[in-house]
Image (cartoon, grey):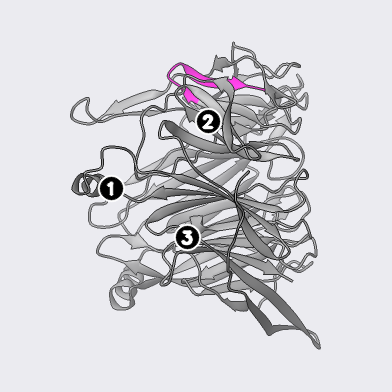
């Protein structure tokens, strides 16, 4: 039995009438509720909402932000304690249901569950342990020889270990090891035997063997033999190495090569640096950007990204989409020529694929900053630059040449160290009409809301301006329909708050 602690929350109700349609004004109401969190901690928040629970549940992981120098000064011999807390909402109030310290030997954690039940699971001493929310104890699930050993005091322990590989509603296990990738499917929540497939990780080290790193090839889920079961694919030297999923949920140990005939394409990792220590070499790099079903035909499409660098002022990006096709043998292939080409200038801060209109097709959302003489002068004088948010819509089976929507947002920029505030660009259904609205962050105190419209413009021209305390990082935004009312809630991680650090939960009424 765990003691239930009722917390005191501040509630603010806002009423805005800033947007008009014809002669009718639109009112947008929302409430803000807060949950306090520990200071000098990094915070992870995950929704545990599921059909099994009659109330909303939030899981919070608190990791002390202590670097090596601080630990030495404080004479810390052991890793600082990381805490797990579960809050439940009842009668418009949030209650602390469980507070528990993570075992010091638990290196990584992730959420595992079904549509009915979600919980926390972690890697501890070569075992995957699941938290029983009712008892507050960790219980054994399966063994693992993960490549992750040791701990980092300053980093969040959360990573992805679980996803539904066979689409049966139950999460399965996927984890890199020094022998490849460990895979274990579950049946009704019980895990079958572990198997290891896929390529070995790549090793690198600097100067001496004291700094050794390992990087695994990222797995992609594709349906290669079009049997409505997801297969595991790895990009190696310009080709996919595909491991077919079998009827029992396991995977073939011998891979099949899928060659899209793009041999000059590198892997999915590339880094662009800003600031005085930047070392961005001139030239063109072709990268694998993603494998997504962007046109909604049930077949995965290949997305490639060309990055062209001609000095600091000459950055360009070009995205090529090669449509997935069913070849003559009933196997997945890709068209030889790109069906869509999207060209943008400047540094690409982010790009996302999201079905904003609910038609089954993905819109392409690009956030970028065009670095030129004017940009540098503005950054030096005002410590701000303009970032461009562009949304490309599909016309038929191809993307339009020009963005359907373009928005410009001024953000802070420190040219001395290259630190750029990247605004959050989000999609959420906040009014419950079944369409995704566009949310654009402006600084740390303003959220611009462009309501969705059933038109070629996709969203309203004018924005509703919400005055809110917002996170400094785009990672501090979480979107979730917590109460299953058809309206998405915003969960904001405000660890930098001028007051006490907290989480804000925004409910739209």
Query: Magenta segment, principal secondary structure?
Result: strand
| Front position among marks 1 and 2 | 1
Q: Secondary structure at mark 1?
A: loop
- The residues bearing labels 3 and 1 have C-alpha atoms spaced at a distance of 32 Å
| Circle nearer the N terminus (3, 1) | 1
Looking at the picture, does residue 88 appear above or below residue 23? Answer: above
Identify which residue is drawn at 62% across, 62% down: 490
Q: Residue furthest bottom?
A: 23
Q: Looking at this view, is 254 or 111 the one in front? A: 111
Find disc 1 in the rendering and name its residue.
67
Q: Is disc 2 surrounded by few (<14), some (14 to 19) or many (20+) residues within 10 Å? A: some
Find disc 2 in the rendering and name its residue.
262
Residue 506 percent location from the top left of the image: 63, 67
Residue 289 percent location from the top left of the image: 53, 41
In the image: residue 175, left or right of residue 480 = left
| Front position among marks 3 and 1 | 1
Find disc 3 in the rendering and name its residue.
368
């Amino acid at each position: 039995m765990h003691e239930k602690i009722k917390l005191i929350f501040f509630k603010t109700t806002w009423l805005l009438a800033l947007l008009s349609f014809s002669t009718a004004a639109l009112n947008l109401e929302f409430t803000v509720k807060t949950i306090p969190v520990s200071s000098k901690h990094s915070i992870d928040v995950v929704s545990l909402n599921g059909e099994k629970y009659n109330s909303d549940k939030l899981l919070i992981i608190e990791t002390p932000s202590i670097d090596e120098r601080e630990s030495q000064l404080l004479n810390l011999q052991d890793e600082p304690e990381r805490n797990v807390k579960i809050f439940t909402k009842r009668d418009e109030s949030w209650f602390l249901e469980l507070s528990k310290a993570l075992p010091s030997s638990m290196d990584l954690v992730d959420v595992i569950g079904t549509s009915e039940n979600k919980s926390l699971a972690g890697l501890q001493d070569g075992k995957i342990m699941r938290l029983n929310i009712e008892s507050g104890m960790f219980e054994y699930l399966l063994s693992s020889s993960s490549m992750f050993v040791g701990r980092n005091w300053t980093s969040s322990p959360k990573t992805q270990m679980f996803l539904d590989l066979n689409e049966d509603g139950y999460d399965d296990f996927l984890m890199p090891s020094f022998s490849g990738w460990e895979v274990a499917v579950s049946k009704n929540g019980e895990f079958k035997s572990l198997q290891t497939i896929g390529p070995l990780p790549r090793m690198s080290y600097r100067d001496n063997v004291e700094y050794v790193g390992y990087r695994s090839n990222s797995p992609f889920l594709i349906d290669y033999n079009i049997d409505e079961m997801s297969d595991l694919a790895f990009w190696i030297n310009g080709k996919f190495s595909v491991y077919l999923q079998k009827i029992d949920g396991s995977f073939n140990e011998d891979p099949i090569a899928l060659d899209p005939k793009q041999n000059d394409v590198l892997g999915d990792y590339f880094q662009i640096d800003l600031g005085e220590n930047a070392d961005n070499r001139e030239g063109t790099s072709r990268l694998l950007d993603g494998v997504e079903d962007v046109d909604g035909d049930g077949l995965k499409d290949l997305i490639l990204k060309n990055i062209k660098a001609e000095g600091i002022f000459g950055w360009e990006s070009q995205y090529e989409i090669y449509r997935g096709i069913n070849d003559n043998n009933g196997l997945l292939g890709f068209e030889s020529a790109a069906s869509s080409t999207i060209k943008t200038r400047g540094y690409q801060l982010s790009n996302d694929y999201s079905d904003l209109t609910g038609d089954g097709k993905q819109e392409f959302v690009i956030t970028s900053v065009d670095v030129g003489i004017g940009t540098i002068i503005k950054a030096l004088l005002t410590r701000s630059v303009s970032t461009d948010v562009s949304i490309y819509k599909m016309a038929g089976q191809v993307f339009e040449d020009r963005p359907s929507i373009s928005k410009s947002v001024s953000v802070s920029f420190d040219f001395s160290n290259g630190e750029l505030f990247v605004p959050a660009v989000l999609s959420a259904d906040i009014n419950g009409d079944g369409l995704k609205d566009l949310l654009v962050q402006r600084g740390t105190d303003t959220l611009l809301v462009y309501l969705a419209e059933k038109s070629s413009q996709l969203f309203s021209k004018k924005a509703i301006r919400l005055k809110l305390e917002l996170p400094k990082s785009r990672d501090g935004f979480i979107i979730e329909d917590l109460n299953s009312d058809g309206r998405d809630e915003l969960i904001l991680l405000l660890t930098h708050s001028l007051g006490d650090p907290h989480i804000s939960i925004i409910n739209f009424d």
